[in-house]
């Protein structure tokens, strides 16, 4: 695996010739963020050696290198989900490559179902912590010591300083937001009312099908993570209305201006 990661990183490095400051992952329905980036290089996943291919509508399939607020960013438009049938190794492969490219800061966005009674559809939640209920762990198996340690500290999964800067910016700019815990399930079914109830009882505020494996692999390699969720539907033991992928995409689109502003504010104001 290490050889493949090196080969892919080498290819991307040859194309972009620079070390990006941030990698940014665009979640379901959040693709419009790419219009904010001044593109310098665009790579289709299919043209990148060893890169996996996406299968979901609403997820593109491009790595875009460019400038956002004057910072060098590598945008991942289209991520890989476990429910697509990919192994965890495949789901997290790009993040292994990002580390080899020298990227320290990761910004992850996603669409999620809200279980906190204060949340509304279209709200934005900054992720302060997560609960991993994916059925397979991305670090299971022989550890590759060159990449990170066997046992990984997870006391600060989401970087406190990035979160503080995003919050400070959102307050100043008058952008409403919540801070909460994201719980990851494999999907692809949305949750039953009882399952949303379980998510809530476990101490989470939102539930989704991504992000957590990516953060785990990033932390394995000592990277710093910031996560932002758009609440695209609401669930709970007493709520039973149908959720569709179209509604998820629509709600994510609606919240897009807030997500864009917060991500831009963070990129502009944060440096390590
Ligand atoms: N559950 C899981 N994943 C999701 C949801 C949800 O309610 N909404 C968007 N992604």
Image (cartoon, rainbow, N blue to C red):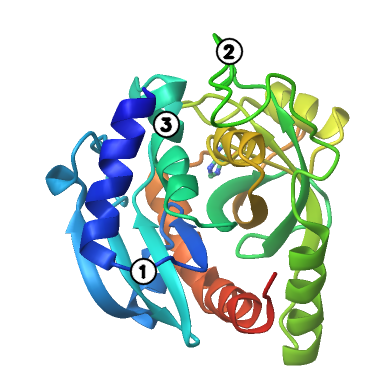
Quadrant in which the N terminus appears: top left
Q: Identify which residue, 161 or 197, lies in the foreground.
A: 161
**Which is nearer the N-term, disc 3 or disc 1?**
1
What residue is shown at x 74% (from left), y 28% (from top)?
A: 152
Q: Please tell me whether residue 182 is drawn above or below residue 148 in the rendered image.
A: below
Image quarter where the C terminus lies is bottom right
Q: Is residue 69 visible?
A: yes
Q: Secondary structure at mark 1?
A: loop
Q: How many numbered discs, if any?
A: 3
Ligand 1: which quarter? top right
In three-dimensional space, the C-alpha distance between marks 1 and 2, rounded to whole angstroms, equals 32 Å
* Residue 226 place in picture, x, y as percent: 66, 57
Cβ of disc 1 within 8 Å of ligand 1? no
Q: Quadrant of residue 49?
A: top left
Residue at which label 2 appears:
140
Q: Are marks 2 and 3 in contact (CB under 8 Å)?
A: no
Residue 125 picture location, percent across and down:
71, 59
- In the picture as drawn, the residue positioned furthest to the top comes out as 141
In terms of sequence position, does the residue under pointer 2 or pointer 3 come before the other? 3
Residue 181 in picture, x, y percent from top left: 78, 44
- Rendered image quadrant of residue 259: bottom right
Question: For residue 16, which quarter of the picture?
Answer: bottom left
User: Is label 3 or label 1 in front?
Assistant: 1
| 72, 148: nearer the viewer | 148
Rounded to the nearest whole Å, what is the CA distance between mark 3 and mark 1?
25 Å
For disc 1, the marked residue is: 18
Does label 3 point to a residue whose CB lies under 8 Å from ligand 1? no
Q: Is residue 56 visible?
A: no
Q: Residue at x 60, y 21 (%)?
A: 134
Residue at mark 3: 91
């Amino acid at each position: 695996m290490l050889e493949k990661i090196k080969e892919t990183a080498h290819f991307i490095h040859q194309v972009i010739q620079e070390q990006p400051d941030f990698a940014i992952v665009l979640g379901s329905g959040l693709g419009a963020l790419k219009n904010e980036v001044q593109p310098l290089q665009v790579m289709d996943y299919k043209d990148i050696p060893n890169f996996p291919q996406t299968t979901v509508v609403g997820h593109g399939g491009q790595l875009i290198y460019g400038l956002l607020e004057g910072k060098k960013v590598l945008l991942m438009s289209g991520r890989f989900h476990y429910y697509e049938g990919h192994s965890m190794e495949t789901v997290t492969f790009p993040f292994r490559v990002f580390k080899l490219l020298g990227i320290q800061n990761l910004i992850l966005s996603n669409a999620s179902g809200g279980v906190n009674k204060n949340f509304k559809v279209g709200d934005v939640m900054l992720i302060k912590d997560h609960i991993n209920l994916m059925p397979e762990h991305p670090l299971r198996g022989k550890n590759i010591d060159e990449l990170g340690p066997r046992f990984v500290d997870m006391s600060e999964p989401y970087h406190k300083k990035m979160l503080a800067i995003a919050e400070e910016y959102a307050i100043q700019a008058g952008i409403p937001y919540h801070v909460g815990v994201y719980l990851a399930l494999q999907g692809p079914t949305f949750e039953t009312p009882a399952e949303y109830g379980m998510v809530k009882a476990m101490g989470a505020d939102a539930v989704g099908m991504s992000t957590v494996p990516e953060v785990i692999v990033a932390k394995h390699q000592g990277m710093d993570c910031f996560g932002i969720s758009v609440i695209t539907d609401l669930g709970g033991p007493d709520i039973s209305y149908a959720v569709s992928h179209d509604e998820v995409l629509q709600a994510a689109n609606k919240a897009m201006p807030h997500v864009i502003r917060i991500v831009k504010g963070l990129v502009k104001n944060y440096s390590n």
